[in-house]
Amino acid sequence: MENLVSDGLELMVFGMGFVAVFLTVLVFATTGMSALVGKYFPEAPAQPKAKKAAPAAAAASNNDELVAVMTAAVHKYRS
């Protein structure tokens, strides 16, 4: 019985040690790959996009059309 418990504990320590070593190597590998990607493929700075200013007449036309569509939809819903 003593031999079985010691074998189990030995296997547990070996497994936990293997997982700890693997995770440590994984952290270093990820950090290294991130540094390499940052060095060879730097991100371009974000350029602000210029917004087009809509003419006032077009905006008023869109609002009038929107009001007409909404009015027709409400009228249709109530009838």
Image (cartoon, rainbow, N blue to C red):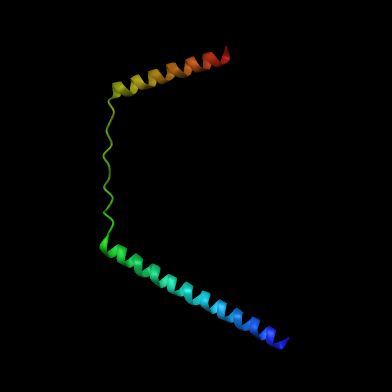
Q: Nearer the viewer, residue 60 or 8?
A: 8
Against 73, residue 18 (above or below) is: below
Identify the residue at image location x=30%, y=66%. 36
21 displayed left or right of 43: right
- Residue located farthest toward the right when viewing the structure as drawn: 1
43 displayed left or right of 29: left
Against 9, residue 36 (above or below) is: above
Identify the residue at image location x=36%, y=22%. 62
- Residue located farthest toward the bottom when viewing the structure as drawn: 2
Q: Position of residue 15 (x, y in %)?
A: 56, 77
Against 11, residue 37 (above or below) is: above
Task: Find residue 33 and report its image quarter.
Answer: bottom left
What is the quadrant of the C terminus in the image? top right
Q: Nearer the viewer, residue 13 or 35?
A: 13
Q: Position of residue 25 (x, y in %)?
A: 43, 74
What is the quadrant of the N terminus in the image? bottom right
Q: Position of residue 2 (x, y in %)?
A: 71, 88
* Count of picture labels: 0
